[in-house]
Image (cartoon, rainbow, N blue to C red):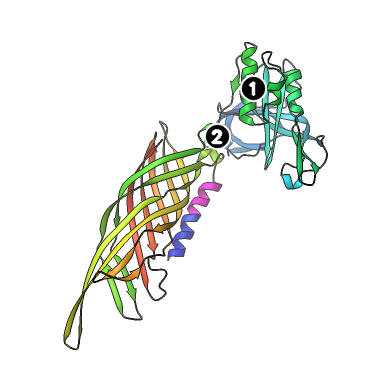
Amino acid sequence: MKKLQIVLIFSVLSACLFSQGDYKKAYFINNENEKIDCYIKDRDTRDNPTGFEYILEMASEKYAASISTVKEFQIGSAKKYIRFSGNIDRSAVLLDNVDENRNPVWSDELIYLKTLVEGEASLYVYQEGNLVRYFYRSGNSKLIEQLVFKHYRVAAWVMASNNYYQQQLFNNVRINKMDKKDYENLEYKESKLIKYFLNYNKSKGINSIQYKSLKDRESFNFKVVAGFSFAAAYKAENEVIDRELIFDPFFSFTIGLEGEYIIPFWKNRFSLFFNPALVYYRGEDEITRVFLTIENTYLYEINYTAIDIPFGLRYYVFTKNQSKAFIDLAFVTGLYLNSEITMNSSEYLNIQGGNNFRLGAGYSFGKHSLSLNFDYNKDLLGDYPTWNSSYNRLALVFKYQF
């Protein structure tokens, strides 16, 4: 049953992942320079597209467009792609595969470039897997060319880089107040190049258009977490010695922290998180046994204190007014702090084992969020092969992002 639940949960999350893509108001320009208003399916993948799916009206017939028929398209106000025919350097970017050639290895291709900054000088990017290349256009020129940057090997374990992009910018997109040293310190990074092109256009008295997507949001979130939880009756049994312990349901408080990394594609709908938090459970079970007419009473007590450490995947559904609903699934491990079951105040069983899965759902509004988490089938006595137990807990937690 537990395996079936896990399979079903992962199936739901997988369906969310692979069904990504909303139709958004857009346009495209075809080879005849006709501008077609439409709705384009925004898949928000990291790689540059080679085509797209669109409809002319909502709930109407779907069409496919390719790079051979469309020279430009824009989705909402965040994404604009233009067709480029020319040279791109596809030299290896992973250090294990870098060659000894300092010069770019050009390939004449037809690709879509994503527009980052548009103005007197414009900046574009092409991404495919690990390959990231930046392109630019300056002045009234219609010519677009790649900003050249390449790692190459000069010895077995010695790397160098061709930073010709710095010379290109100095020659063709120069900001007068910057000297040669400033260009030598300019990094081949998206944030640095965007800032440079914005400053260049500003220095020319030209307004820039910067295309920002959901990826420009903060990638890391840190939250403080507090709430209360309800643990169902905890049952532990050992068929070998015919022993059964049942502890009452228990209400408790929990407090902790959460770190979250927003995955920078799929429209920021997925994140990875970890959430260390203090949890505890207390309970008693009094059992009377009779042996040869002698009656004995035993008091069993559980004192469970731990720092739960869930690692999981979260899926967001964005709503209005910057709020969003979410579901998440986590694998929970933990650190156990002097946790044990005692019999008449003497140690009986030591609690050291127990990993489990957690399913959660909630709602986030601004810096605040509220979620309901369900931990199920945690075996606190996993280190004892003859004991079986199941600890289930429901928690309502409040989170504040700082």
x then y, percent, for residue 42: 57, 36
Please identify the residue farthest to the bottom as the structure is shown. 292
x then y, percent, for residue 337: 36, 59
Q: Nearer the viewer, residue 95 or 50?
A: 95
Q: Who's the residue at 32% across and 61% down the image? A: 304
Q: Amino acid at mark 2?
A: Lys
Left or right: where 146 falls relative to 192: right
Q: Is residue 21 above or below residue 138?
A: below
Q: Who's the residue at 76% across and 37% down the image? A: 160
Q: Nearer the viewer, residue 240 or 60?
A: 240
Kindly state the secondary structure of the residue where label 2 is placed. helix
Quarter placement of the C terminus: top left
x then y, percent, for residue 199: 62, 18
- Tell me the crowding category of disc 2: few under 14, some 14 to 19, or many 20 or more residues within 10 angstroms, Cα based: some
Q: Is residue 187 visible?
A: yes
Does the stretch in magenta take in 272? no
Does the stretch in magenta take in 17? yes
Q: Which residues are magenta?
A: 11-21
Q: Nearer the viewer, residue 209 or 200?
A: 200
Which of label 2 and label 1 is nearer to you? 1
Q: Is residue 48 above or below residue 358?
A: above
Left or right: where 145 falls relative to 78: right
Helix, strand or loop: magenta stretch: helix
Q: Amino acid at mark 1?
A: Tyr
Q: Earlier in the sequence, mark 2 or mark 1?
A: 1
x then y, percent, for residue 182: 68, 22
The residue tagged 2 is 215
Q: Nearer the viewer, residue 282 or 395?
A: 282
Q: Are marks 2 and 1 in contact (CB under 8 Å)?
A: no
Residue 101: image quadrant is top right
Which label number is shown at residue 196? Answer: 1
